[in-house]
Amino acid sequence: LAWVCGANFWHDGLHFGLSTDWRINAWLPYLFPFFSSPWMWYHEHVIGHHAYPNVDHKDPDLAHAPQLMREHTSIKWRPMHEGQAQWHRVLFVWSVAVGIGLSLLNDVKANLKLSYNNVVPCSSLSRPRITVHILGRMVYIFLMHVWPFFAFPLWKAVIWATVPCVLLSVCFMVNTQINHLTNECAHASDDTNFYKHQVVTAQNFGNDSLFCYYFSGGLNYQIEHHLFPNVNHCHLPELAKGVKRICERHGVPYHHAVGYRDAMERHVAHTVKMERNPVS
């Protein structure tokens, strides 16, 4: 439920596409602090990723955990990357990506270094704002990971403090990694046309499936979302019809996977390719 609410409301709100009232877009995301603080999400996702999808040293999403996973040639190959496509490796990374990565480590590093993943500059917050920001993160940590140990027996507290975050993180990763990190999209680019670049570096999936649409919060229309990031996802299916026609007319690749299974297979094939030593 947390994932469905986040995907369908939190994401649109942070793109200022949930309401015509800016205050709703600005404040509603603070009711869903599970993924990331809205302040950090603006830098990582709205400013960084959407402006430079799959552009090396500019898209922060390419280097979240370079020591563990290599999904782009801009990431230096390490022996650790061998076997990165093994299901237990992927499951581990995907299980901690949100609860530990996005919500905590990336947040701390960005505020200390004033740079998100070393590619998106972050402005320094005033003392009152950084105080409120830290308090907000502490409240999140307490409610999600500490409070259960005061309210439940140990075995139940461990489950309460870990399982929801793991499930949320896996849902997040499933619905985000398959949209850009495939053999067709990861290294596609167009230096001459911003909108063409948005198209060729993204992949739609399950456009004929209501389950894919609602479970992904419209992220299965990734191409249209990147072309019209401030448009609520309820309009993307209609926009997709025109976008696809224009792409066909001008010979622009319009990547589409049949559904989750097809999209995952394409992503795994890319992960397998990227685990190999490029100089061997």
Image (tube, grey):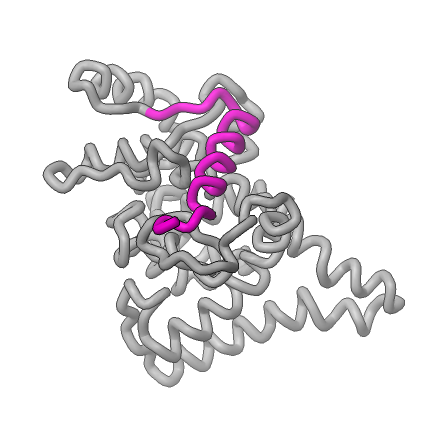
Left or right for 17, reference 214: left
> Magenta span has 257?
yes
* Percent coordinates x, y for residue 242 in the rendering: 26, 18
**Quarter containing the N terminus:** top right
Q: How many marks?
A: 0
Against 1, residue 70 (above or below) is below
Pick out the residue farthest to the bottom. Answer: 127
Q: Residue at x 52, y 56 (%)?
A: 35
Q: Position of residue 246 (x, y in %)?
A: 21, 19
In x, y percent, where is residue 195?
Answer: 19, 35
Q: Which residues are magenta?
A: 255-280
Taking 142 as reference, is 193 left or right?
A: left
Could one spot residue 228 in this view of the protein?
A: no
Q: Is residue 197 above or below residue 6?
A: above
Using the image as rendered, state which of residue 221 and residue 237 is in the foreground: 221
> Viewer-proximal residue, 20 or 129?
129
> Outermost residue toward the front?
280
